[in-house]
């Protein structure tokens, strides 16, 4: 059976215990042993930040902070490090296959990292502090999760030890969470489970009996954190049977290891790839090599390191290393644009000059028909212009003074761009919009067009349309 990779983002408000929760989960799943935990904690206690504010740190948080990777390079160029925040130990194994944890920041200052960490995830765990309840950062990540259509595995109410495992406080915070998720259309059937936990004491994690579990289980009979990993959305299992899509970061992912020949490293987003397969590159300059023949397939540990390991099968969402027949690495580098997508000739990846999308704006944003944004999608980016806006929830059109937080938009790309429809490939339909180096919106593609959409927005010297956040 092919193991399906799953990438889970842990997100929430600042200081609600996300890093401590993630570190505890790595320990409980055996990704990090007791001896290494002690060593990391001893090193952390010698750092200036700890010596200045020792009460702000703990040994589980130290694990996470030590291995956290940036999601953006200077000067704001997207990269793929966020999905390998723990390159050697964030990949945890369960009965449902391997998971990679993404520890998201919570402060609004790091909105780019917050959005991009969620963008890279297959599913999410929301963390809410029992002492604070739902806060501004909780609402922010819920908005982003809704905008990028990322399913929520569950919500963990952390720091229950700080409220003496009070069932009344749990019920109070749980009611806040249910209201938020319903407002954000993040509930299906009975909605994601809400679990009381203590990351410091281990209560609610369900891997082994820990301090606090006895009092917690005296009134809480629901699932544990361990159960969240077992009830992950089944769509990953269907990805192996879908149409082949492999995303390549760009020319830097084309290499020539000694004795191997030309190698391409990319993320297998859907389908299966085997030796002998013929692949096409989209988009690619007309004069460059367009088709590739796969000689061998291996699993790569990370895109950045490019190290590989032997495997009999590679599941969707894994990073793969493809040895290519008959093409020089130097020639292939010229063909491989940033965010290029590989697929089969019988069902090539989509390209378009325009798209209709559902957008979520984070702050008030004035939009003119000649105003340029950068659209980032699966590692690629293209200059674009929003040429039509409509509020999905209120039905306002372009003659309105403003549109709501969620809008339906027509976007024109400066050049042919590879993107997929959300109903076909949800992950390859997600994108973020940036103005200069600031993310202003995120969303998903609804439909694609081979010709630019008609411009209907006001010019700069007319009354503007302003998209306002909620």
Image (cartoon, rainbow, N blue to C red):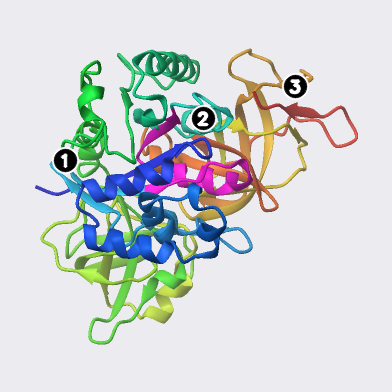
**Residue 401: x percent and y percent?**
79, 20
Few, some or many residues within 10 Å of mark 3 (<14, 14–19, 20+): many
Say whether residue 71 is visible. yes
Name the residue at 30% across, 54% down. 90
Apparent side of residue 46 relative to residue 154 in the rendered image (left or right): right
Apparent side of residue 90 relative to residue 130 in the rendered image (left or right): left
Mark 1: secondary structure: loop
**Residue 57: x percent and y percent?**
46, 50
Q: Which residue is mark 1?
A: 96
Residue 121 within the segment the image draws in magenta: yes
Cβ–Cβ under 8 Å for marks 1 and 2? no
Mark 3: secondary structure: strand
Q: CA distance from mark 3 to mark 2?
A: 26 Å
Name the residue at 17% across, 39% down. 207
Q: Earlier in the sequence, mark 1 or mark 2?
A: 1
Q: Earlier in the sequence, mark 3 or mark 2?
A: 2
Numbered circles on residues, count: 3
Name the residue at 68% across, 15% down. 396
* Residue range corresponding to the magenta coloring: 102-129
186 or 22: nearer the eye?
22
């Amino acid at each position: 059976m092919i193991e399906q990779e799953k990438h889970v983002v842990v997100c929430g408000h600042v200081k609600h215990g996300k890093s401590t929760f993630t570190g505890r989960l790595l320990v409980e799943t055996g990704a990090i042993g007791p001896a290494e935990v002690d060593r990391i904690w001893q090193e952390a206690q010698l750092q200036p930040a700890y010596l200045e504010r020792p009460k702000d740190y703990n040994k589980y948080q130290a694990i996470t902070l030590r291995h956290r990777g940036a999601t953006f390079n200077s000067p704001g160029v997207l990269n793929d490090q966020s999905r390998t925040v723990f390159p050697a130990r964030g990949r945890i194994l369960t009965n449902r296959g391997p998971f990679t944890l993404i520890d998201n920041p919570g402060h609004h200052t790091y909105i780019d990292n917050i959005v991009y960490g969620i963008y890279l995830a297959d599913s999410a765990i929301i963390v809410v502090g029992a002492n604070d309840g739902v806060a501004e950062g909780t609402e922010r990540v819920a908005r982003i999760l809704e905008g990028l259509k990322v399913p929520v595995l569950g919500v963990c109410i952390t720091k229950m030890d700080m409220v003496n495992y009070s069932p009344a406080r749990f019920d109070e915070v749980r009611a806040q969470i249910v209201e938020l998720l319903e407002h954000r259309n993040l509930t299906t059937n009975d909605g994601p489970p809400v679990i009381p936990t203590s990351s410091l004491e281990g209560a609610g994690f369900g891997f082994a009996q820990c301090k606090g579990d006895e009092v917690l289980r005296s009134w809480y009979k629901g699932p544990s954190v361990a159960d969240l990993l077992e009830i992950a959305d089944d769509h990953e299992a269907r990805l192996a049977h879908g149409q082949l899509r492999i995303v390549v970061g760009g020319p830097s992912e084309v290499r020539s290891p000694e004795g191997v020949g030309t190698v391409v490293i990319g993320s297998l987003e859907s389908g299966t790839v085997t030796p002998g397969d013929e692949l096409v590159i989209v988009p690619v300059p007309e004069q460059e090599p367009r088709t590739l023949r796969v000689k061998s397939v291996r699993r790569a540990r990370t895109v950045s390191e490019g190290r590989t390991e032997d495997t009999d099968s590679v599941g969707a969402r894994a990073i793969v290393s493809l040895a290519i027949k008959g093409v020089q690495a130097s020639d292939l580098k010229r063909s491989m644009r940033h965010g290029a997508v590989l697929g089969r000739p019988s069902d090539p990846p989509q390209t378009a000059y325009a798209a209709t999308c559902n957008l979520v704006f984070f702050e008030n944003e004035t939009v003119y028909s000649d105003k340029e944004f950068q659209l980032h999608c699966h590692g690629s980016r293209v200059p674009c212009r929003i040429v039509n806006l409509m509020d999905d929830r209120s039905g306002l059109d372009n003659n309105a003074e403003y549109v709501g937080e969620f809008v339906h938009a027509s976007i024109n790309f400066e050049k042919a761009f590879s993107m997929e429809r959300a109903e076909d490939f949800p992950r390859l339909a997600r994108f973020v919009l940036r103005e200069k180096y600031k993310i202003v919106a995120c969303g998903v593609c609804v439909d694609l067009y081979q010709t630019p959409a008609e411009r209907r927005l006001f010019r700069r010297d007319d009354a503007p349309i302003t998209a306002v956040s909620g």
